[in-house]
Amino acid sequence: MKKVLLPLPDYGFDPAETAIPWLLLTAKGYEVQFATPGGYSAMADLRVLRGEGLGIWKWLLQAREDAVMAYQRMSNSESFCTPLKYTEIRAEDYDALLLPGGHDKGMIPYLESALLQQVVTRFFTDGKPVAAICHGTVLAARSRHLQTGKSVLHSYKTTALLAIQERMAYQLTRWWLKDYYLTYPVTVQSEVTAALATPRQFIRGPLPLRRDDARHPGRGFIVRDRNYLSARWPGDAYRFSAAFIDMLEHA
C-alpha cells in the first residue's frame, strides 16, 4: 500500500481541495497520513465550509455539498484525528506528497513553514510524486534546493490560483470581509511565476467558469510536468485527484 503525506495548517485549509483528494485516494486503497504543526486535528476554513458571512455570493463561494460531505467523512477518520507533528515527518516513509490550499490567514504558518519547505524539497530531490493545488503551489514555490538556492519549481511547468480568481473574490466581498480573500498582498500567480525560470512556464488554462465533479472531471484543469502535478482551485479537485492517483499507480 502506497502512503501519501498530506500536511495541513491548524486552521483554514480549503475543504474541497483536501477532502475530495482524500476521499478518492482512500477509496483506491492508498493510506493518507496527515500532519499539523502541533500534532492536533486541523480544521477547515469554516466560512467556506458553512458559507457564513459570504452574503449574496454564498452560492458561488461556499463549498459544494459533495465537498462538505467528504470533509465530514475525512474529519471523522482515524488518520485525520491522529496527525503527526511537522517535526515528526520523515519524507522517506512516504511515496507521494499532497499540498492542498486555502486562502484564510490561518494558512500562513503552513505556507511559511521552513520544516515543510524542507520536506517538499526532499520529495522533489527524490523524484517522488508531488501534487499541489491553489495556495499549495506557493508552498512548493518557496521550497528551495540547498545547492542552487532556486525554487524546486524553477524548471517545471505549473499552474496555480489565477490572479483574476483571487482578485475577483476579493472585490466581491471586500466591503464586509476586507482582505479575507487575499492571503498576501501579492497574488498566488505572481509569486509562483516569480519562482520559475521563465513566465512561459506558468500555464493559465481556460477561464475557470464551472467546477468539475465526479461525473464531469473534464471541467477541471491540471498541469503535469514529470513528477509534479498542479491545479488552480476547488473546481479542479476531481480531475486533480484522478491525475494524482494515475501518477501513484505508475510511479
Image: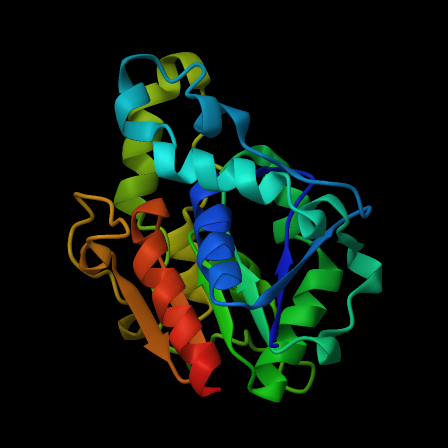
Q: Is residue 243 left or right of residue 10?
A: left
- Quarter of the view holding residue 96: bottom right
Question: In which quadrant will I find the N terminus?
Answer: bottom right
Q: Is residue 217 left or right of residue 9?
A: left
Q: Is residue 104 left or right of residue 68?
A: right
Whether residue 226 is situated above or below residue 5 in the rendered picture: below
Please provide percent x and percent y for residue 3.
63, 72
Colour scheme employed for the rendering of this structure: rainbow
The residue at 47%/28% (across/down) is 49
The residue at 58%/63% (across/down) is 142
The residue at 73%/61% (across/down) is 114
Please provide percent x and percent y for residue 222.
30, 65
Please provide percent x and percent y for residue 82.
77, 49
Q: Is residue 13 visible?
A: no
Looking at this view, is 136 or 44 the one in front? 44
Looking at this view, is 64 or 222 the one in front? 64
Whether residue 134 is situated above or below residue 73 in the rendered picture: below
Whether residue 122 is situated above or below residue 206 in the rendered picture: below
Q: How many marks?
A: 0
Q: Is residue 46 visible?
A: yes
Please provide percent x and percent y for residue 32.
62, 61
